[in-house]
Image (cartoon, rainbow, N blue to C red):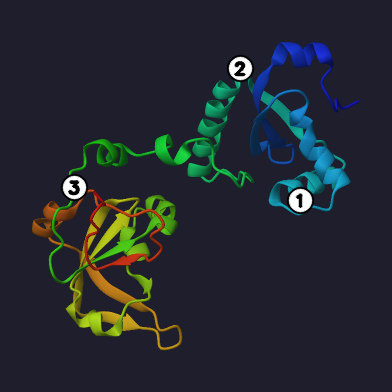
């Protein structure tokens, strides 16, 4: 008979823990969580007793529809709450980075500040000098939303080149595009002559080009730029200045 809750003695001894839900059909984890008490059992109850829709709950329902049980494992236990938050965030960040099929919607605790980074990203984060001047003919394009895709394919060009909402009267003067991720310049591209192309349906622009010459990259690559909180437009034509 499957266990559906922990007894009081187990709850007392186990304390805070980090757990994983495993799909028995594939032997792959699909959800990471942390909690105490009988938290690890709560997802199956939610799947059975509510009509809430989510990838996690649908996977649980699919497993149970085949007459199988979700396998539940505790990765670490007898932790403080702070320790469990850290362990949970490490697992979520690692598995999501390598696209191992997690259904977790929320990222782990402090993932954006201290999560998975390449050595280049770590160097930028702690050593990057500020960019003090943006020359004429340059545009900064924020690629935050597509950065993970670019890292996976090692191709910043495809995620930087378009498509973007850019003022038509600026296009002819833009000769270089700087790919920016979370306040750092991660690549520089030289736009071909007549390299901007407009989609007449969407009105968005895409460029054709190549990685910029080393003489340009050396001035811009891995430089830090100031980004005001709440900045929504991915296109910048000038550097922002922090308020005194």
* Quadrant of the image containing the N terminus: top right
The residue most toward the right is: 1
**Dot 2 corresponds to which residue?**
79
Asked if marks 1 and 3 touch (Cβ < 8 Å), the reply is no
Mark 1 element type = helix
The residue most toward the bottom is: 200
Of circles 3 and 2, the one toward us is: 3
| Residue 220 image offset from top left, x and y in percent | 17, 54
Relative to 147, does residue 107 appear above or below in the rendering?
Answer: above
Of circles 1 and 3, the one toward us is: 3
Q: Which residue occupies the foreground of this view, 196 or 80?
A: 80
**Dot 1 corresponds to which residue?**
58
Relative to 243, does residue 238 appear above or below in the rendering?
Answer: below
Q: Which residue occupies the foreground of this view, 53 or 226?
A: 226
Classify mark 2: residues with Cα within 10 Å, few (<14), some (14-19) or many (20+): some
Please tell me which of labels 1 and 2 falls first in the chain. Answer: 1
Give the alpha-carbon distance from disc 3 to disc 2, as whole Å: 40 Å
């Amino acid at each position: 008979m499957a266990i559906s809750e922990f007894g009081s003695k187990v709850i007392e001894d186990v304390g805070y823990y980090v757990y994983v839900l495993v799909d028995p059909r594939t032997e792959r984890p699909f959800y990471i969580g942390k909690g105490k008490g009988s938290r690890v059992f709560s997802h199956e109850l939610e799947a059975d007793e509510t009509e809430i829709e989510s990838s996690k709950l649908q996977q649980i329902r699919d497993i149970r529809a085949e007459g199988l049980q979700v396998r539940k494992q505790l990765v670490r236990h007898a932790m403080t709450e702070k320790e469990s938050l850290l362990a949970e965030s490490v697992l979520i960040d690692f598995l999501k980075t390598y696209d191992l099929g997690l259904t977790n919607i929320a990222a782990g605790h402090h993932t954006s500040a201290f999560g998975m980074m390449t050595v280049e990203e770590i160097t930028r984060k702690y050593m990057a000098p500020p960019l003090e001047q943006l020359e004429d003919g340059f545009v900064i394009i924020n690629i935050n939303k597509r950065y993970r895709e670019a890292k996976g394919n090692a191709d910043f060009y495809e995620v930087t080149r378009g498509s973007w909402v850019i003022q038509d009267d600026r296009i002819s003067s833009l000769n270089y595009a700087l790919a920016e991720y979370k306040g750092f310049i991660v690549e520089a591209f030289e736009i071909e002559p007549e390299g901007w192309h407009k989609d007449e349906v969407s009105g968005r622009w895409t460029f054709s080009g190549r990685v910029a010459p080393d003489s340009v990259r050396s001035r811009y690559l891995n430089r830090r730029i100031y980004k005001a909180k709440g900045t929504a437009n991915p296109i910048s034509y000038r550097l922002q200045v922090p308020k005194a």
